[in-house]
Image: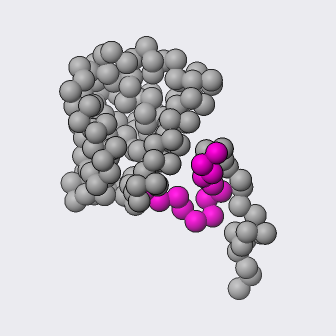
Amino acid sequence: MTAETPARAAGIPVRALTVLYDAECSLCAFVRDWLVKQPTWVPLETVPAGSAEARRRFPGLDHRATLDEITVVGDAGQVYRGAAAWIVTLWALRRHRPLAHRLSTPNGARLARGAVLAAAAWRGAQGRGRTPQGSGWVYDRRAGWTYHPPGCADGGCATPS
């Protein structure tokens, strides 16, 4: 599982997780409601992404990015985004830890990433979530999400000043 882990959190066990979710997204709210009903091995708390509470608790986070991509924060400062966030959240749940272990393999991680991209596509169709300009991610209804690194041809190159 990959995560953005501050040096102070390296090697420290995760004893609690905070899931930041988009409170204005019906899919996100549905998943949040499902999560809080699940028995856990590791306590989960949910906080609306970008909220005053999230900003107070996690001042070092890019709170705009937490509205674009699921973000989970461990009690020792570990930060998980995207597929890693889904995997660590499943790892905290009693009934879904075996699935989290399967998703943490290279093949499983591809499946988890696909689930995250499918959720992003649904959110985008609902007018929620943002795909950053020049990020290289393109959604096609037939092919799904694909990544095309930005280049000069699409205007992604910086011009000298």
Pick out the residue farthest to the bottom. Answer: 161
* Vertical placement of residue 156 versus 68, above or below: below
Relative image position of residue 142 (x, y in whole percent): 64, 45
Please tell me which residue is depicted at 40% across the width and 55% down the height of the picture. 126
Using the rendered view, name the quadrant where residue 46 is placed.
top left
Q: Could you tell whether 72 is left or right of 137 in the image?
A: left
* Vertical placement of residue 82 versus 104, above or below: below
Quadrant for the C terminus, please: bottom right
What span is colored magenta in the figure?
129-142
Relative image position of residue 143 (x, y in whole percent): 66, 44
**Camera-nearest residue between 53 and 23:** 23
Please tell me which residue is depicted at 32% across the width and 21% down the height of the picture. 93
Please tell me which residue is depicted at 21% across the width and 54% down the height of the picture. 53
Pick out the residue farthest to the right. Answer: 153
Q: Is residue 58 visible?
A: no
**Camera-nearest residue between 144 and 109:** 144
Relative image position of residue 149 (x, y in whole percent): 71, 55
Q: Could you tell whether 91 is left or right of 50 in the image?
A: right
Please tell me which residue is depicted at 45% across the width and 21% down the height of the picture. 100
